[in-house]
Amino acid sequence: MTNYSVVTNDRYRLNYHVMAPSGWINDPNGFSFFKGYYHIFYQYHPESAVWGPMHWGHARSKDLVHWENLPIALFPGDEEDQDGCFSGSAIVKDDRLYLMYTGHNLHDKNNPDDYWQNQNIAVSDDGIHFTKCQDNPVIAEPPTDNAADFRDPKVRFENGKWLVVIGSKDQQGLGRVLQYQSTDLKNWTYVGPLATAESADTQGFVWECPDLFKLAGQDILIMSPQGIKPQELKYRNLFQTIYLLGTVDSATQQLNYHEFRELDHGHDFYAPQSMLAPDGRRILFGWMDMWESDMPEQADGWAGALTFPRELHLNGDKLCMTPVQEIAQLREHLLVDEADLQAKYCFATPTKSVEYLGEFDTTAAVEVKVTDTDDQVLVGLRFDPEKQKLILEKYNDDLPREVAVTKIDDIHLLLDKSSVELFVNNGEVCFSERIYDEKDFYIETSSDAERFSIKAYQLGKGVFINE
Ligand code: FRU
């Protein structure tokens, strides 16, 4: 019997972002489309607002914006997943929905650092009830040159076979991604490492949650390394999410890539996962939090949320993210529609559920701030034309996030009750932030641009239609 955590206060509950009904969540898992519904699962501890033995929570949606909570899809505790059903992915095969996930097992229940991990399959006919496969674990152990870290399988179908990338760490303490292949999802052959960190300090000691896909003819690997040390403007969070853009060599099956780049520059973004939508879009959810950060909603019986779903696209060699167009279905009415603004414009944000679209097209200074009724700046984004930098400041952190930028075309901002997501220059630079403040909010824009325009919509409730 699951003893569910209880939400005792809704002050920070989000209006249109995926959350669990109560309890703790982290990574998005199993993002897929099956029998007319998008499915999103997430790492879930239903019994309290802190991380614990991982379950898979579950929600589905026909339109990516109105979500329906479903029963827990995976419970830990079987022989192969005694201490957790860790992250993984979903694929559709023969009209059934398959989940591939990591079994987490402790050698000694008192020592969380002494574990083994394996890969498992569960299957469903209706997309709601899942049965773990009798052949589990389908990959019992990592290759011999690997450490115990061996998790987060992301499966795809390519050239007539199933391929899976798995996050891991080698025996030298370097993060890496491994590949396996299969024709039936049950028997897997090791292909080899797809990519490995050059050093733990510069590229990480474990690469978690890998996701390999093609976009506009490029091979892209997104993964979440732990342990990268801050370098000048970069890597200012505890952990990062990185993308590598290049080509997988068909002979060696290794990824030749150009550069290590952060996918989102905000404080609260980790372990994202993408899927190919039926209409060909590549859509991604991230966990909109960070390990070890303060999460004041824990006092209210829950913790953690997913980002608004984002469409991925390439601009040259930059991977960009923009909110999915379905956001239009949440627009209740226009709050602001101003075309010829100068200097400064400020407006209140009723219900704290607002989509803001600013058009600037300028190389002059721009600043967009979310403030409260006491003039406390919760999140302030500033383009400094002299420094040629975009600078994000946040009320509870002294270390700004900074990104090199030469002009501001547009800023798209999504405000919810305890989150702000910013997409600059058609999603070329993004910041995901959780904010906790019970006062009312304003959005204030100032700019030296000759003219700028702002549109803002009040958004309705997306999640959860059955809460
Ligand atoms: C990433 C992660 C994964 C793991 C899961 C456990 O945030 O550490 O590597 O599968 O969380 O909840």
Image (cartoon, rainbow, N blue to C red):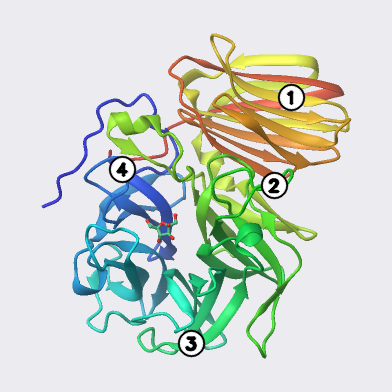
- Where residue 69 appears, x then y in whole percent? 30, 48
Residue 256 figure quarter: bottom right
C-alpha separation, residue under disc 1 versus residue under disc 2: 21 Å
- The answer to whether the residue labelled 3 contacts the one labelled 1, judged by CB atoms less than 8 Å apart, is no
Which amino acid lies under the numbered mark 2 shown in the image of this protein?
Answer: Lys
Label 2 secondary element? loop
C-alpha separation, residue under disc 3 versus residue under disc 1: 50 Å
| Residue 172 position (above or below residue 427) | below
Front label number (3 vs 1)? 3
Q: Residue 50 carries which label?
A: 4
- Where residue 205 appears, x then y in whole percent? 54, 63
Who comes first in sequence, dot 2 or dot 3? 3
Residue receiving disc 3: 190
User: Is residue 309 left or right of 50 when viewed as pictured?
Assistant: right
Who comes first in sequence, dot 1 or dot 2? 2
Q: Residue 234 carries which label?
A: 2
- Tell me, yes or no, if residue 356 can be seen here: no
C-alpha separation, residue under disc 4 versus residue under disc 3: 35 Å
Front label number (1 vs 2)? 2
Which amino acid lies under the numbered mark 4 shown in the image of this protein?
Answer: Val
- Where residue 332 appears, x then y in whole percent? 51, 29
Instruction: Sort mark 3 into few (<14), some (14-19) or many (20+) by Cα contacts within 10 Å.
Output: some
- The answer to whether the residue labelled 2 contacts the one labelled 4, judged by CB atoms less than 8 Å apart, is no
Who comes first in sequence, dot 1 or dot 4? 4
* Between 227 and 416, the one nearer to me in the picture: 227
Ligand 1, what quadrant? Answer: bottom left
Who comes first in sequence, dot 2 or dot 4? 4
Who comes first in sequence, dot 3 or dot 1? 3
- Tell me, yes or no, if residue 326 can be seen here: yes
C-alpha separation, residue under disc 1 versus residue under disc 4: 36 Å
| Beta carbon of the mark 3 residue lies under 8 A of ligand 1 | no
Residue receiving disc 1: 367
